[in-house]
Image (cartoon, grey):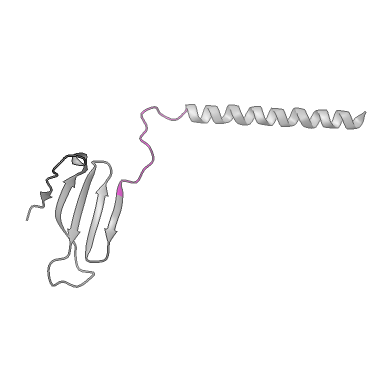
Amino acid sequence: MSRNVLLTGLLVCTVTLGVAATVFRAESNAKAPANAAPASPKYTIIETDGTNLLVVDNSVNTLYFYTLDPGKEVGSDLHLRGSLDLSQVGKPTIKPTAAAK
């Protein structure tokens, strides 16, 4: 008989823990703000080799292109050469924007 009591107690504890975990998870998910942005990086590096850099600003959906000045060594400053509005992707023609000099 004590074995049945032990098994019943173990079953009750297991069910109680399962219910508590489910309720806790539901409450923690409900506390997240409805207008919260999804967790994603602000920038995504597309390509770099030390002489150029292609990077996307995910918050404004824009690709930026940086390169070295002609004749400069790797490790020198990279300069913005242009950008591209990625909301234009899918259109027959995309017009890049040259950087101000």
**Total numbered badges shown on the rendered structure:** 0
Which residue reaches farthest right? 1
Task: Please state the extent of the stretch shown in magenta in the rendering.
Answer: 31-43
Image quadrant holding the N terminus, namely: top right
Prevailing secondary structure class for the magenta stretch in the rendered image: loop
The image quadrant that residue 48 belongs to is bottom left
How far across and how far down the image is residue 17, in percent? 68, 31
Quadrant location of the C terminus in the rendered image: bottom left
Q: Which residue is depicted at the point 79% across and 32% down?
A: 10
Q: Is residue 75 left or right of residue 20?
A: left
Does residue 57 appear left or right of residue 81 in this picture?
Answer: right
Tell me where residue 98 appears, x and y as whole percent. Answer: 10, 51
Q: In the image, is residue 89 part of the stretch drawn in magenta?
A: no
Q: Quadrant of residue 76?
A: bottom left
Point out residue 59 in the picture as x, y percentages from the top left corner. 27, 41
Residue 40 is one of the magenta-drawn residues:
yes
Is 77 situated above or below 80?
A: below
Give the farthest residue toward the left: 101
Q: Position of residue 25 (x, y in %)?
A: 56, 31
Please tell me whether residue 90 is drawn above or below residue 11 in the rendered image. Answer: below
In the figure, is residue 64 to the left or right of 29? Answer: left
Which residue sits at x=36%, y=43%?
Answer: 40
Taking the spot 19% from the left edge, 55% from the top edge, the residue there is 65
In the rendered image of this protein, does residue 67 appear above or below residue 4? Answer: below
Residue depicted at 16% across the width and 49% down the height: 83
Q: Nearer the viewer, residue 25 or 93?
A: 93
